[in-house]
Image (tube, grey):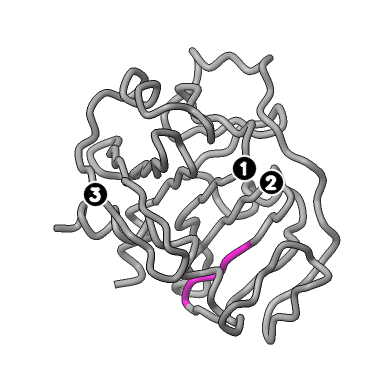
């Protein structure tokens, strides 16, 4: 049951958190357009891309390759922000979840606050040229995903009424369920992928 819950959560997480603190129909494509009632708006970061010089053969499955650097769902929040730089928006209106937006690269990082500490919760990537440890990026085909990861542990068909989008979520679990990777497929290609740290997920229950 927990696995199914994390599939559903990860497939709608980006859209749900984007809606926090915004009126219906609003968008947040640039930092100048954002006026959160809580949080911080700072300078936009530069473009982010994967780096072909990183040897994917030496990476574990919790790693993402971004701009020649590596990021892990098991990192602490300081390490995450050291890699990505300053976010264009930090939103804490969905407490205990805090979301960090990096618009040029279509990245959303979420954390959970508990016991006066902040724990990485989810990493959502919608931009191109950001790679998983097995070389999967936005734009990769479903067949490439299956070739890289095998058949998913869970596969869920979704329809988002707010955005009128049909998709299929392919979920893979690693290290005995310590973290999950959900890959969203639209029209046969990867539209986004999301890592969830299940230890942090448990803090939201």
Quick check: 103 left or right of 25? right
Question: At 67% across and 83% down in the image, what residue appears?
Answer: 38
| Marks 1,2: beta carbons within 8 A | yes
Say whether disc 1 or disc 2 marks the residue closer to the N-terminus: 2
- Neighbour tally class for label 2: few under 14, some 14-19, many 20 plus, Cα within 10 Å: many
- Mark 1 vs mark 2, CA separation in Å: 5 Å
Q: Position of residue 137 (x, y in %)?
A: 53, 31
Q: Which residue is mark 2?
A: 105
- Quadrant holding the C terminus: bottom left
Question: At 66% across and 17% down in the image, what residue appears?
Answer: 52
Q: Position of residue 159 (x, y in %)?
A: 33, 60
Q: Which residue is mark 3?
A: 156
Viewer-closest of 57 and 105: 105
Magenta part of the protein: which range? 96-100
Quick check: 47 left or right of 111? right
User: Magenta region's main secondary structure?
Assistant: strand
Q: Is residue 81 magenta?
A: no
Question: At 30% across and 40% down in the image, what residue appears?
Answer: 170
Report the disc number at residue 127: 1
2 to 22, vertically: above or below: above
Say whether disc 3 or disc 1 marks the residue closer to the N-terminus: 1
Question: At 56% across and 46% down in the image, what residue appears?
Answer: 126
Q: Position of residue 192 (x, y in %)?
A: 49, 44
Say whether disc 3 or disc 2 marks the residue closer to the N-terminus: 2
| Marks 3,2: beta carbons within 8 A | no
Q: Secondary structure at mark 3?
A: strand
Q: Is residue 99 magenta?
A: yes
- Mark 3 vs mark 2, CA separation in Å: 26 Å
- Neighbour tally class for label 3: few under 14, some 14-19, many 20 plus, Cα within 10 Å: some
Quick check: 173 left or right of 11? left
- Mark 3 vs mark 1, CA separation in Å: 22 Å
Q: Secondary structure at mark 2?
A: loop
């Amino acid at each position: 049951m927990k696995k199914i819950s994390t599939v559903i959560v990860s497939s709608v997480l980006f859209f749900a958190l984007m809606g926090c603190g915004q009126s219906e129909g609003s968008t947040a494509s640039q930092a100048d357009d954002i006026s959160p009632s809580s949080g911080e708006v700072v300078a936009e970061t530069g473009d982010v891309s994967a780096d072909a010089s990183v040897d994917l053969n030496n990476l574990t499955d919790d790693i993402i390759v971004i701009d020649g650097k590596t990021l892990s769902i098991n990192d602490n929040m300081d390490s995450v922000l050291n890699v990505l730089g300053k976010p264009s928006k930090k939103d804490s209106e969905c407490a205990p979840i805090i979301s960090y937006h990096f618009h040029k690269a279509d990245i959303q990082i979420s954390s959970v606050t508990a016991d006066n500490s902040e724990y990485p919760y989810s990493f959502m990537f919608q931009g191109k040229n950001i790679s998983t440890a097995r070389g999967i990026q936005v734009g990769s085909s479903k067949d490439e995903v299956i070739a890289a990861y095998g058949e998913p542990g869970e596969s869920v068909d979704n329809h988002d009424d707010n955005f009128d989008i049909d998709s299929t979520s392919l979920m893979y679990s690693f290290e005995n369920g310590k973290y999950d990777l959900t890959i969203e497929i639209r029209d046969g290609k990867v539209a986004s992928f999301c890592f969830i740290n299940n230890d942090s997920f448990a803090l939201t229950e």
